Image (tube, helix red, strand yellow):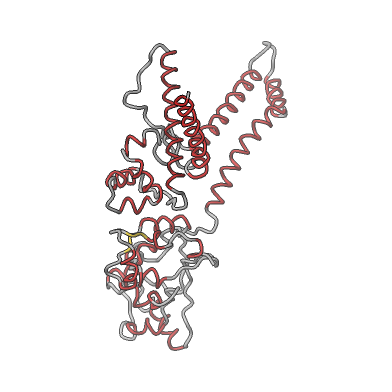
Amino acid sequence: MKMPMRRALIGLGLLLWAQDGKALFQANCASCHAVNRRVVGPALKGVHERWGDEAEIIKFVQNSQAYINGNFKNSAYAKKLYEEYNKAVMTAFTALSPNEIKSILDYIKAESAAAETANTASGAAGGGGAGSAGGSAPSDTSPLLWVLTIALGAIAIALFITTLSLSRVLRPEKEESSERGIFQQVGNFMASPRFWGIAGIVAFLWFCSATIKKARSVGLHKGYQPVQPIAFSHKTHAGEYKIACQYCHIGVEKGKSATFPSTNICMNCHTYIQEGSRYGNKEIGKILASYQENKPIEWVRIHNLPDYVYFSHAQHVKVGGIACQTCHGPVEEMEEVYQYNDLSMGWCINCHRQTKVDLTANPYYARLHAYYKEKEVTVEKLGGLECSKCHY
């Protein structure tokens, strides 16, 4: 009696352990993973077989980027998986203990076994359909695709109902029906609750689509190109004559703003060059007038972030070594500068996730070099995704 009782208690313990894992899975993993299908990340069924060592899975879950860039048993496989899924960075679950992650893995194993049993029973009932020796292909269906499918289905149903109703209205019931009678029937249909219900559904779907599109574009000014007081050609200055951006925008390595060039900076060259190749002395004459009248040129700002966003040019250009073209596009090819990127929050976060930090060539990171042993360190690892880094 003792041995069966012991096995029963062990089985009950594993079941409860898997139930704890289910709650942890729903709280931490379900937004990106499912057990038996692909979502944002891969399906987790068979994860034990693919990794071969549960301890390595636990290390990966606690800090995926450190595992990928480190020298662990399955680092090569983890890196291949990272590249296969478009280098989407998995959240580091440092707050989860090894036992908690193990309970999640036990839940995945239990769910996989249950699904395998259900598939086997279904195959037997259906007369032994095609087997799954190679495993079924993971679904690439995303939640957004389901929303679009439902919306298109609703529109298709509405159009089908409209077609049936119109065909019934326009069908000649009697030979003596006049053209006026047909228009009257159509008018009656358009005044009916059914027509207005269909029109309401179509209008609601259009309103939702337009609202979402408009909301996502609030505060974004990609392509903005205001008229400047002087027709200044970046293509001529930065492209043809290869004048460095820092020569005119002197604040780019010193503070938050790159600053507009003062008239004195322009006069360093235009004291001697007073006729341009394209506009003659018309535009350069405006610079000379500004200098003689001691009146600054009122340049129009193009790139302007919201007031609650903190951004430092010095941190990015001087410390990070980021080229001007990364954010502002190929200005050396622009006759008139315009906003090349949308400079949205998502755009900045993606850059922080992907930009690698050189700890060896920059003395600013000398102290961090000893702390971070990985060969590649991104801005994200240095706190680049913390809200307080960019927002007051």
Residue 347 lies in what quarter of the image?
A: bottom left
Position of residue 163 measured from the top left corner of the image (x, y, whole percent)? 59, 23
Q: Nearer the viewer, residue 69 or 20?
A: 20
Q: Nearer the viewer, residue 48 or 208?
A: 48
Above or below for 25 versus 390: above
Residue 255 image point, x, y percent: 43, 76
Q: Residue at x 43, y 62 (%)?
A: 383
Residue at x 27% of width, y 52% of height: 71
Work out whether 262 lies above or below 189. Answer: below
Q: Position of residue 362 (x, y in %)?
A: 30, 71
- Residue at 31% x, 73% y is 363
Residue 78 placement: quadrant = top left
Q: Residue at 65% across / 33% down in the picture?
A: 199
In front of the other: 76 or 332 = 76
Q: Quadrant of the C terminus?
A: bottom right
Image quadrant where residue 313 sits: bottom left
- Viewer-proximal residue, 74 or 90? 74
Q: Position of residue 145 (x, y in %)?
A: 48, 36
* Image vertical order of residue 81 relative to residue 146, above or below: below
Is 52 on the left or on the right of 45, as rendered?
left
Total number of numbered discs in the rendering: 0
